[in-house]
Amino acid sequence: MLTKGQARLFFLGGTIFFSAIFLVLTVDTLRQIPERQNSGPRRHRWCAAR
């Protein structure tokens, strides 16, 4: 059984830990977006019709 202080530390520690993981994964995903996109210098089909 955890005391009230231990439960608070457990909650805050877990919150900080998983928030940090979430932020790292978000930044990593945002860094990879340009590499994963297929768009380049070519124009899309709907642009050529104009």
Image (cartoon, rainbow, N blue to C red):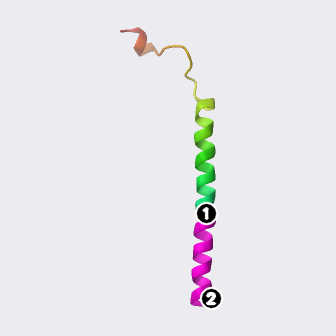
- Secondary structure that dominates the magenta span: helix
Range of residues picked out in magenta: 1-18
- Which residue is at 61% across, 70% downward? 14
- Which residue is at 38% across, 9% downward? 49
Image coordinates of residue 24 in percent, x first then y, are 63, 52
Residue 8 picture quarter: bottom right
Q: Amino acid at mark 1?
A: Phe
Name, please, the residue furthest toward the left.
50
The numbered disc on residue 32 is none
Residue 11 picture quarter: bottom right
Image coordinates of residue 13 in percent, x first then y, are 62, 72
Find the distance from the CA under tag 1 to the CA under tag 2: 21 Å
Give the labeled residue for mark 2: 2
Characterize the local packing of mark 2: few (<14), some (14-19) or many (20 or more) Cα atoms within 10 angstroms. Answer: few
Characterize the local packing of mark 1: few (<14), some (14-19) or many (20 or more) Cα atoms within 10 angstroms. Answer: few
Give the labeled residue for mark 1: 18
The earlier-in-sequence mark between 1 and 2 is 2
Residues at circles 1 and 2 in contact by the CB criterion of under 8 Å: no
- Which residue is at 60% across, 46% downward? 27
